[in-house]
Image: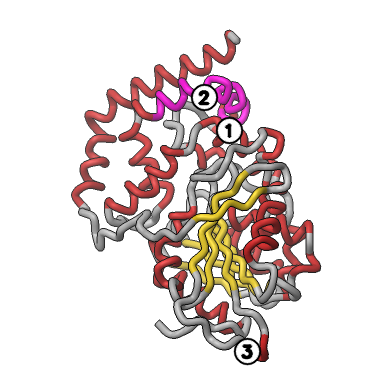
């Protein structure tokens, strides 16, 4: 208990210093973000469909939304229509796919869901807060909402790891039910996740200390959540610096920061160990059986471009889109490039989208 209190005390003191420092450097950067303006002011969180609940194999309810095709095209050769399933990343939620959802709405049957313990989905037992369980959840969602017809899987960050976990668990699905995949700003291993915490926990400790202390801090998660609120300007600036490469509109930064802030630190801590132990590069070769697009920003500070290049090298026939100057949230920052690559993926799989 005393160790945990000391860790939280150190965090509290450092956040206090950070809050004081916000009157200078942090405040200056915060104002710089605000001065950018809202940009095109997208209506984030406005794209909705009637939710359904898919129950995972351990009883956790998963929040799922499906956008159907406005005017279903006649399936080619009598086959059921395509379904695209989108898997979001760590401490985000299904709304992060705003621009992709907007792009395909009415043209392709698309499925979006909140990963366990994220967004509107139910809380996971701690022992099931793993990448392997996320792969199992993805199959459960696929079986429930797309039992027939070709499926294309699209994953960002932890969502890409989810797809890799499914490939390891069920390689026979690729080239059969699964007709294509997109791995965006992700990896299959070799990740030091310390920096992932920085937008969610002010940088009061180095990576080694974070690894030692994050589990202890999780037991005092309510206190940590309170400290995160106190240091909100620090967190916003960290989000801007770590999630994006260019000076994106303030509305984008606010949107991502709001998703991170809404994720309880207890959830952050439960999934954290799985990133450090992830080692699945030997499993990604099965993706060579289907058209696979690998996408990343060249200045991604969380899953660097080297991870995507390694995935590309391990997945025969895959394509690699490097979005110059973009960061980890390339799905927002370079949504036009990402959407174009997804369109090409569908064409490569012989499953082009309907007319706009």
- Colour setup of the view: secondary structure
Q: First in sequence: mark 1 or mark 2?
A: 2
Q: First in sequence: mark 3 or mark 2?
A: 3
User: At numbered mark 3, what does the secondary structure look like: helix, strand or loop?
Assistant: helix
Task: Please tell me whether the stretch drawn in magenta is mainly helix, strand or loop.
Answer: helix
Horizontal arrangement in the rendering, residue 142 relative to residue 206 (left or right): right
Residues shaded magenta: 210-228
Q: Report which residue position mark 1 lands on.
A: 269
Q: Is residue 74 visible?
A: yes
Residue at the image point whose x is 66% and y is 59% from the top: 163
Does the magenta portion include 299? Answer: no
3D distance between C-alphas at marks 1 and 2: 9 Å
Does the magenta portion include 215? Answer: yes
Residue at the image point whose x is 66% and y is 62% from the top: 142
Residue at the image point whose x is 56% and y is 35% from the top: 267
The reply to whether discs 1 and 2 touch (Cβ–Cβ < 8 Å) is yes
Q: Position of residue 75 (x, y in %)?
A: 61, 86
On screen, residue 167 above or below 264:
below
On screen, residue 66 above or below 24:
below
Residue at the image point whose x is 40% and y is 24% from the top: 227
Q: Position of residue 341 (x, y in %)?
A: 50, 75
Could you classify mark 2 by the number of other residues whose Cα lies within 10 Å: few (under 14), some (14-19), or many (20 or more)? many
User: At numbered mark 2, what does the secondary structure look like: helix, strand or loop?
Assistant: helix
């Amino acid at each position: 208990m005393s160790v945990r209190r000391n860790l939280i005390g150190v965090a509290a003191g450092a956040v206090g210093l950070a809050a004081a420092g916000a009157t200078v450097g942090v405040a200056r950067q915060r104002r710089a973000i605000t001065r950018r303006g809202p940009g095109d002011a997208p209506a984030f969180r406005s794209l909705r469909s009637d939710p359904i609940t898919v129950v995972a194999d351990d009883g956790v309810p998963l929040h799922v939304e499906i956008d159907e095709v406005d005017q279903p095209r006649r399936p080619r050769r009598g086959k059921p229509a395509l379904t695209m399933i989108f898997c979001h990343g760590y401490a985000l939620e299904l709304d992060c796919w705003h621009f992709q959802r907007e792009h395909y709405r009415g043209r392709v049957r698309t499925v979006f869901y909140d990963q366990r313990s994220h967004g509107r989905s139910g809380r996971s037992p701690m022992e099931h807060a793993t990448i392997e369980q996320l792969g199992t959840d993805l199959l459960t969602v696929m079986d429930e909402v797309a039992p027939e017809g070709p499926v294309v899987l699209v994953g960002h960050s932890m969502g890409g790891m989810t797809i890799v976990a499914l490939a390891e668990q069920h390689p026979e699905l690729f080239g059969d039910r699964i007709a294509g995949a997109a791995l965006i700003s992700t990896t299959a291993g070799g990740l030091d996740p310390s920096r992932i915490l920085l937008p969610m926990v002010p940088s009061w400790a180095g990576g080694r200390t974070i690894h030692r202390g994050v589990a202890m801090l999780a037991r005092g998660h309510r206190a940590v959540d309170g400290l995160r609120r106190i240091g909100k300007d620090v967190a916003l600036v960290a989000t801007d610096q770590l999630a994006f490469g260019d000076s994106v509109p303030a509305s984008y930064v606010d949107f991502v920061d709001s998703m991170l802030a809404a994720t309880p630190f207890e959830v952050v801590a439960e999934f954290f160990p799985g990133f450090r132990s992830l080692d699945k590069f030997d499993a990604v070769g099965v993706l060579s059986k289907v058209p696979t697009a690998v996408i990343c920003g060249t200045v991604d500070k969380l899953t660097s471009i080297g991870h995507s290049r390694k995935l590309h090298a391990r997945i025969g026939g895959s394509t690699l889109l490097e979005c110059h100057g973009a960061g980890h949230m390339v799905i927002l920052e370079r949504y036009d490039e990402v959407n174009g690559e997804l369109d090409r993926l569908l064409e490569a799989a012989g499953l082009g989208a309907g007319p706009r």
